[in-house]
Image: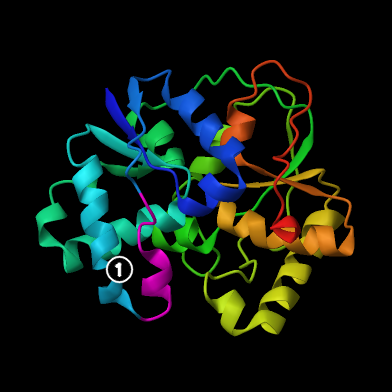
């Protein structure tokens, strides 16, 4: 496979280890290329109600990724934005859009991975982002009757040594919501604190997710309140074949 690696701007700037882990995973399935000209996909503009102002970003994405067999990124929210807004704003990209995948989708639906050689001996709880769950249908959500397994759970269950902790409210929003956290910071933080209490009460050591944006929001609250839990991207766990301890990246929200 000829795979284009799509790294969202916030992962590139604040959490590069998630991007590196995604690269290492994809290298098992084909030749991976990282176009250096890629930029933001334009999702922040769309979230703020300025959808058309993100057209330039979508055109640039198409320019750099159109020739790959698959385009894979470690962010359900950015991938969903490209799919939902790409065809509507930039019809020329319609043939490319079916090739754009979230890492979870790619591993489960394309390469059908069922024997990951990963080892992570820790108590982990899975945060299911709204974009991944309700937008991309990576698993069932409580407000709809769906006979569909969770793709992220199925991958984590292949990891040796891991203990998956069940939350009481398994698919509740963390409160980030992109620009929502800027427009309504008090509500956003309160939602994040409620989510974290549930996760900490489960006994988990780590919170993982396929969306680093949600983890970034939660990590900011964790660090400001010195809470006893860490965040780690799903790709970092799936790319941990030998190490008994994975450290999250040294870049943190409250240091930027």
Tell me the quadrant of the picture where the N terminus can be found. Answer: top left
Regarding residue 110, the answer to whether it shows in the image is: yes
The scheme the figure's colours follow is rainbow
Q: Viewed as shown, does residue 243 lie left or right of 90?
A: right
Q: Quadrant of residue 117?
A: top right
Q: Quadrant of residue 64?
A: top left
Whether residue 199 is in magenta: the answer is: no
- Residue at the location (52% across, 37% down)? 19
Whether residue 46 is in magenta: the answer is: yes
- Residue 188 horizontal/vertical position (percent): 66, 76
Whether residue 241 is situated above or below residue 246 in the rendered picture: above
Whether residue 204 is situated above or below residue 196 in the rendered picture: above
Between 195 and 59, the residue placed more toward the observer is 59
- Residue 95 horizontal/vertical position (percent): 13, 48
Tell me the quadrant of the picture where the C terminus can be found. Answer: bottom right
Whether residue 252 is situated above or below residue 90 in the rendered picture: above
- Residue placed under numbered mark 1 in the picture: 54
- Residue 226 horizontal/vertical position (percent): 89, 58
- Residue at the location (46% across, 61% down)? 131
- Residue 140 horizontal/vertical position (percent): 49, 56
Which residue appears farthest toward the left when viewing the image? 92
- Residue at the location (34% across, 46% down)? 38
Give the structural element (helix, strand or loop) at label 1: helix
Q: Which residues are magenta?
A: 39-49
Number of marks in the image? 1
Regarding residue 97, the answer to whether it shows in the image is: no
Q: Quadrant of residue 7?
A: top left
Between 199 and 61, the residue placed more toward the observer is 61
- Residue at the location (17% across, 35% down)? 67
């Amino acid at each position: 496979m000829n795979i284009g690696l799509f790294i969202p701007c916030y992962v590139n700037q604040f959490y590069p280890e998630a991007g590196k882990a995604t690269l290492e995973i994809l290298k098992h399935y084909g030749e991976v290329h990282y176009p250096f000209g890629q930029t933001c996909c334009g999702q922040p503009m769309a979230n703020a109600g300025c959808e058309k102002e993100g057209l330039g970003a979508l055109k640039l994405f198409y320019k750099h990724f159109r020739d790959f067999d698959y385009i894979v990124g470690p962010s359900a929210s950015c991938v969903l934005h490209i799919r939902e807004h790409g065809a509507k704003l930039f019809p020329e990209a319609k043939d490319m859009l079916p090739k754009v995948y979230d890492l979870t989708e790619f591993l489960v639906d394309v390469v059908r991975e069922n024997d990951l050689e990963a080892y992570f001996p820790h108590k982990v709880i899975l945060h299911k982002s709204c974009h991944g769950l309700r937008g991309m249908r990576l698993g069932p959500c409580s407000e709809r009757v769906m006979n569909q397994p969770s793709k992220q759970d199925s991958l984590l269950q292949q990891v040796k040594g891991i203990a998956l902790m069940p939350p009481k409210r398994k698919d509740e929003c963390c409160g980030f919501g992109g620009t929502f956290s800027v427009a309504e910071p008090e509500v956003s933080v309160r939602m994040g604190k409620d989510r974290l209490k549930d996760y900490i009460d489960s006994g988990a050591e780590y919170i993982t997710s396929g969306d680093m944006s949600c983890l970034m929001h939660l990590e900011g609250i964790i660090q400001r309140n010195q809470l006893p839990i860490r965040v780690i991207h799903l790709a970092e766990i799936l790319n941990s074949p030998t190490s008994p301890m994975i450290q999250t990246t040294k870049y943190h929200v409250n240091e930027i």
